[in-house]
Amino acid sequence: MKNWSGKSVLVAGGAGFIGRHLVTTLLEAGATVHVVDNYATGEEASMKALCARFVSHLTTQTDDISENHVLPPTDVIFNLASPASPRHYQADPIGTWKSNVLGAFHLLDHAQNCGASFVQASTSEVYGDPLHHPQVETDWGNVNPVGPRACYDESKRAAETLLMDAWRTGQSDIRIARIFNTYGTGMTAGDGRAIPNFMSQAKAGQPLTIYGDGSQTRSLCYVSDTVDALMRMGLMDAAKGEVINVGNPVEMTILQIAETVNAHFGSRSKIVFEPRPVDDPTRRCPDIGKAKRLLGWSPIVSFAEGLTRMAEDVRQPTEVERVVLP
Ligand code: NAD
Ligand code: UDP
């Protein structure tokens, strides 16, 4: 990891799952870290231990930032401030729009005021239900603009457009990471995503719930690999003005993922099949050629290793929270 000492870094959404890993790794690398978070899905308790180690902490929404909120001079901004789990972003679709569009506007203003580099946490959801496979950065995506996932997909797409306009007009140094499904320690049971659900179900000896027949695919990236890519994007000139896929290209069906989690935890839980959520993407796998070429990055943590790290984390969820999506 390159040296971040002397850098002032603002992490919006720093109390969330990826945010807490990013903040911890930035601190270890010597950065001065400032966090903005509204704790909509972030964990206040987990942040308390970290709080003593970073310099400032503003509890507000990025979409509410005004002249009354003084943001510190910043060299690099990471914008992670958005709900990421379908359960969370669909529970408050208008709030999701505000976070992703108004939040990006406000943070862009701050980046322009202090000449900061801006790393946007975008998503593989901009590809929607992809027409091409694996997904390359040049794909335009296939999103249902009026479906229940659209508040997230389309607001992330809008933020990409805004930020690339700022780049093209020479107003800002923009770097866009299209993050594919990321998992790891610190995910909570209430999160509703596949890995925390399967893990907590397997540990509790309850049935693992597969939505649909389990033939849909995802490619799972361990969180330390995702954080490594984001930090490279924050420092490396090669990322300026670029859109870069960040993900692990090992593609698995959801059924394979559920069976692997079950086996990993020595669980004999049965697998049950439930209705597939509306607009649930069928296949998802990143082409990471660009990340390899520009950042010298590729993921190093295997799925088995990632599950082992999660199993060893005593904080992992044991409660199962059921979620019903439209
Ligand atoms: P998360 O929900 O755990 O964390 C998001 C954080 O942002 C939380 O702390 C939340 O309280 C905060 N937040 C939300 N809206 C806010 C607002 N308006 N103002 C201030 N803070 C706000 O999600 P995550 O999994 O850590 O994802 C982080 C980022 O990465 C998100 O932008 C997400 O879209 C993106 N991403 C994540 C994944 C993944 O698999 N985890 C995949 C693709 C993209
Ligand atoms: N999924 C599932 N059971 C669960 C949670 C999710 O079968 O308990 C499926 C979901 O329908 C999707 C995949 O797993 O096809 C990944 O879902 P997740 O919410 O983790 O991420 P995303 O849909 O955003 O890729």
Image (tube, rainbow, N blue to C red):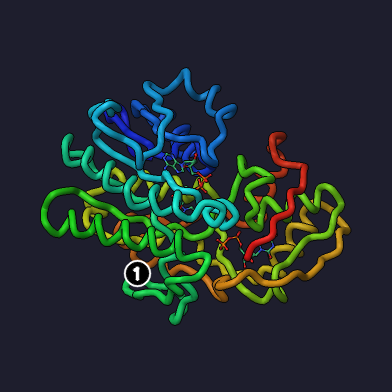
Identify the image quadrant of residue 32: top left
- Rate crowding at label 1 as few (under 14), some (14 to 19) or many (20 or more) other CA atoms within 10 Å: some
Point out residue 294 in the picture as x, y percentages from the top left corner. Answer: 29, 59
Q: Answer whether residue 292 is visible to the viewer in this image.
A: no
Instruction: Answer left or right for 175 relative to 318.
Output: left
Residue ID at (72%, 70%): 255
Q: Is residue 301 left or right of residue 2?
A: right
Residue extending furthest left? 170
66 on left or right of 210: left
**Quadrant position of the C terminus in the picture:** bottom right
Disc 1 on helix, strand or loop? Answer: loop
Q: Residue 133: in sight, yes or no?
A: yes
* Residue hosting label 1: 137
Q: Residue at x 81, y 67 (%)?
A: 272
Identify which residue, 64 or 315, lies in the foreground: 64
Q: Is residue 213 above or below residue 180?
A: below
- Residue at 27% in and 42% down: 106
On screen, 163 above or below 58?
A: below
Q: Nearer the viewer, residue 82 or 95?
A: 95
Q: Amino acid at mark 1?
A: Glu
Judge whether 194 appears above or below 43 on screen. below
Q: Position of residue 149 (x, y in %)?
A: 51, 65
